[in-house]
Amino acid sequence: MSKTAMAGRVSSTESTVKDALFDVTELHKGFAAPAGMLNILQGLSFSLQEGEFLAVVGESGSGKSTMLQILGTLERPDSGEIRLDGEPIQALSSSRQAQLRNQKIGFVYQAHHLIPELTALENVALPLLVQGCSEKEGQARAAALLARLGLAERQLHVPSKLSGGEAQRVAVARALVAKPRLLLADEPTGNLDEKTALEVFGILKQLCREEQAAVVMVTHSMALAKRCDRILYLHNGRLVERC
């Protein structure tokens, strides 16, 4: 390859990384085990653009949840680099990472993890209150989002009075109310029937597109994965793309 061609390839790669909203490079993570070090993640690398929806699939125990914990700064990698909006986030202090999570990262889990004593409205408004919004403004923004999700009549109900699909939609609203740049979803529809799962997924995808949030969704459902922009398979600690 000529020097000119090589320079062009490097320039193109640098441009892609620079323009990426979320960029992961050579992420490694291992755990000590009786038989020796267990290497869970071995050189994970990928990039996401604004509004891009990525599905990650893999066998149980392949490290998908560990990957999400690290991407969300809830756990530290052994090595590698993670950049969000161009900022390296893996080496930030714990307090700065907590601030970053509240401002730029949203989480949706298989179990909705709503606070049982709070109403749907209060659960959704909570991230805004942590950011310093007034209660009035936080609840107004939460109410507007719940209405978009078809829950205007259920906003004053506590989680125990909601159906599974309703509770998961509240969890989606809570994850998105602060307009995160990155959304991490761990089997977000795993506890729902197929019809409700597709409905919740459709709402999640639409709202993330509108806000131009990048999404990494771990799922066992190929039906949902095929509705995403890309599918990556976590196999032997690495992410691979298959046709």
Image (cartoon, rainbow, N blue to C red):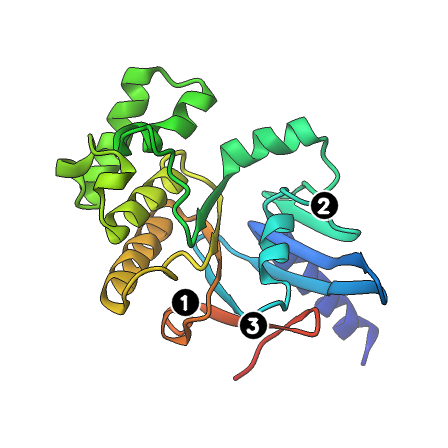
Judge the density around disc 1: few (<14), some (14-19), many (≥20) Cα neighbours within 10 Å: some
Residue at screen point 32% across, 28% down: 118
Does 2 appear above or below 159? below
Mark 3, residue position = 58
Q: In the rendered structure, are the residues bearing label 3 and label 2 in contact, judged by CB atoms less than 8 Å apart?
A: no
Disc 2 residue crowd, few under 14, some 14–19, many 20+, Cα 10 Å: some
Who's the residue at 55% across and 49% down the image?
Answer: 21
What type is the residue that disc 1 sits on?
Cys
Instruction: Say whether residue 43 is left or right of residue 217.
Output: right
Residue at the extreme front of the image, as rendered: 34
Q: CA distance from mark 3 to mark 2?
A: 21 Å
Find numbered disc 3 in the image and state the secondary structure of the residue it sits on: loop
Q: Which residue is mark 1?
A: 228
Q: Which residue is outermost to the left? A: 153
Could you tell me how far apart the alpha carbons at marks 3 and 1 are, in whole angstroms? 15 Å
Q: CA distance from mark 1 to mark 2?
A: 27 Å
Q: Quadrant of residue 158?
A: top left
Q: Nearer the viewer, mark 1 or mark 2?
A: 2
Question: If you read the primary sequence from the N terminus, does the residue marked by circle 1 or circle 2 appear first?
Answer: 2
**Residue positioned most to the bottom:** 243
Q: Amino acid at mark 2?
A: Arg
Quarter of image, res 61: bottom right
Q: Position of residue 146 (x, y in %)?
A: 23, 38
Judged from the image, the secondary structure of the residue bearing numbered disc 2 is loop
Q: Nearer the viewer, residue 232 or 10?
A: 232
Q: Looking at the image, which residue sits at the far right? A: 36
